[in-house]
C-alpha cells in the first residue's frame, strides 16, 4: 500500500482524480496530515465515511514509533525511529535561540564512503521515501509539542543520491497548505554530486545548498571523500559557480577541520584562492570523533586561526557549534541501526 505522506499536494490531487475523487479533497487530506497532524483516516471528519474507507483500503499513514530518545547536556535530542520495515533511522533536534532545527536522514545507510563519517561504511539498505523524510519532522514535533522552524538535510545519507524523494519532501515541507516551512529555512548538504547540483539549481526552490568541501587539493580530498574521484574539486566548484549564477543564492561550504590534515594556514590560503569572489560562506566544523576514525579534531587555536585567516581575506567564515557530541548526535556521528542492534 502507498504511504499517503509520499505525495506532495500536486501529486495527491492527481492521485485523487485518478481514483475518481474531487481534486479539492487532496487539500483537505493535506490539511489533516500537516496542520491538524492526525494519525488516522478516521479522524478526517470532513470526508465522507465512504471516502475514508476507500483511503484506508488503499493507503497507509506512516507514523513513526520512537525506539529510543537521548538528550544531550546542551539540549540536543537524538531520536531513533522505527521506519516500519525492520530498519531504524536517526534524527536530531537542535535548539537554537532562533528556533528549533531538525536534522533529517535521507537514506538507510550511505554509499559515499567519506572516511571521517560514521553514517557510511555500514551496508547501504535503501532510500527513504518522501513521506519517511517528512515523518521525521512530524514525529519530533509531536514529541516536543512545538513547531519546527528549520530543517537541515544533514543526517544519514547523501540527499542528492536520493534526489527525487528529497525534492518531493522539500515540496511537502514548504507547501503553505502543509507544514509551511520556508525554503530559506531548509538546507540541503551534499558531498558533491555535480549533475544533481545543476538539477537543483533548476528546481526553483529557494533552499540553501551546503557543499562538503573539506579539502583544497584533489589528492587530499580524494583521500577523505571517494566521491572526489568521480567529481573533482574544479568540476565541483564550477557547478557551484553555475548554481550561484542560476539561483543568485549564496552557497555554504562545509570544511571539517582535522589536526595535521587540512587545518594549517597553507590550507586556509588555498581555500581563499579557490573561493575568492564567490557568493559564499564557509562553515568550519571541528571534526567529530567516530569509532575507528583516523582523524583527530584540530586544536581550538588552529580552528580560530583558520577562521580568522579566512575572514581577514574576504571569505566569511564561522565555526559550527558542536551540538550533541555526548550522545553521538553531532555531524558525522549518526549511524544506520537495525532493530536487534541499536
Ligand atoms: N551526505 C551529506 C550530508 C552529510 S552530514 C554531505 O556529505 O554533505 C553534514 C556534514 O557533516 C557534511 O559536511 C559532512 O561532511 C560532515 N561530517 C561528516 N562526518 C563528520 C565528522 N566526523 N566531523 C565533522 N563533520 C562531519
Image (cartoon, helix red, strand yellow):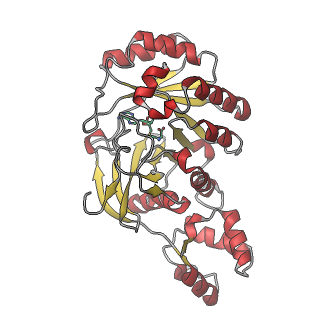
Residue 338 in view: yes
Q: Residue 271, image x and y in percent?
A: 51, 16
Q: Nearer the viewer, residue 136 or 231?
A: 231
Q: Residue at x 44, y 17 (%)?
A: 307
Q: Where's residue 172, x and y in %? A: 61, 58
- Left or right of residue 149, residue 8 in this image: right
The image quadrant that residue 97 belongs to is top left
- Counting every numbered tag in the picture gives 0
- Which residue is situated farthest in the bottom direction here? 50
Query: Is 76 above or below relative to 265?
Result: below
The answer to whether 327 appears left or right of 279 in the picture is: left
Q: Is residue 284 visible?
A: no
Q: Residue at x 58, y 87 (%)?
A: 53
Q: Position of residue 331 (x, y in %)?
A: 38, 38
Tell me if 156 is positioned left or right of 173 in this view: left
Residue drawn 72% across the image and 76% down it: 18
Rendered position, 175 above or below 228 = below
Tell me if residue 318 comes above or below residue 1 in the rendering: above
Observer-nearest residue: 113 or 91? 113
Q: Which x, y percent locates residue 257?
A: 38, 24
* Quadrant in which the C terminus is drawn: bottom left
Which residue appears at 60% of the width and 89% of the height?
49
Q: Quadrant of ligand 1?
A: top left
Amino acid at each position: 500500500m502507498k504511504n499517503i505522506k509520499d505525495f506532495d499536494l500536486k501529486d495527491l490531487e492527481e492521485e485523487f482524480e485518478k481514483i475518481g475523487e474531487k481534486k479539492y479533497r487532496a487539500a483537505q487530506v493535506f490539511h489533516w496530515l500537516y496542520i491538524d497532524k492526525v494519525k488516522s483516516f478516521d479522524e478526517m471528519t470532513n470526508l465522507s465515511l465512504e471516502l475514508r474507507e476507500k483511503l484506508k483500503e488503499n493507503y497507509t499513514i506512516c507514523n513513526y514509533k520512537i525506539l529510543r530518545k537521548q538528550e544531550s547536556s546542551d539540549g540536543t535530542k537524538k531520536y531513533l525511529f522505527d521506519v516500519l520495515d525492520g530498519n531504524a533511522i536517526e534524527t536530531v533536534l537542535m535548539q537554537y535561540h532562533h528556533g528549533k532545527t531538525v536534522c533529517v536522514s535521507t537514506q538507510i545507510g550511505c554509499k559515499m564512503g567519506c572516511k571521517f563519517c560514521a553514517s557510511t561504511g555500514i551496508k547501504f539498505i535503501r532510500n527513504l521515501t518522501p513521506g519517511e523524510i517528512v515523518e521525521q519532522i512530524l514525529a519530533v514535533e509531536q514529541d516536543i509539542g512545538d513547531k519546527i522552524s528549520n530543517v537541515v538535510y544533514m543526517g544519514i545519507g547523501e540527499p542528492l543520491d536520493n534526489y527525487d524523494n528529497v525534492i518531493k519532501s522539500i515540496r511537502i515541507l514548504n507547501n503553505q497548505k502543509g507544514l509551511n516551512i520556508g525554503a530559506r529555512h531548509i538546507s540541503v548538504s551534499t558531498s558533491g554530486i555535480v549533475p544533481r547540483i545543476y538539477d537543483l539549481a533548476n528546481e526553483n526552490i529557494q533552499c540553501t545548498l551546503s557543499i562538503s568541501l573539506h579539502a583544497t587539493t584533489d589528492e587530499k580530498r580524494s583521500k577523505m571523500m571517494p566521491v572526489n574521484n568521480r567529481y573533482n574539486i574544479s568540476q565541483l566548484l564550477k557547478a557551484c559557480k553555475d548554481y550561484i549564477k542560476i539561483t543568485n543564492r549564496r552557497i555554504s561550504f562545509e570544511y571539517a577541520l582535522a589536526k595535521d590534515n587540512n587545518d594549517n594556514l597553507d590550507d586556509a590560503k588555498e581555500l581563499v584562492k579557490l573561493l575568492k569572489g564567490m557568493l559564499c560562506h564557509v562553515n568550519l566544523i571541528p571534526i567529530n570523533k567516530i569509532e575507528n576514525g583516523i582523524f583527530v579534531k584540530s586544536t581550538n587555536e588552529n580552528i580560530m586561526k583558520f577562521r580568522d585567516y579566512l575572514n581577514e581575506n574576504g571569505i566569511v567564515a564561522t565555526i559550527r557549534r558542536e551540538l550533541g557530541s555526548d550522545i553521538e548526535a553531532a555531524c558525522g556521528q549518526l549511524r544506520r541501526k537495525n532493530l536487534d542492534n541499536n
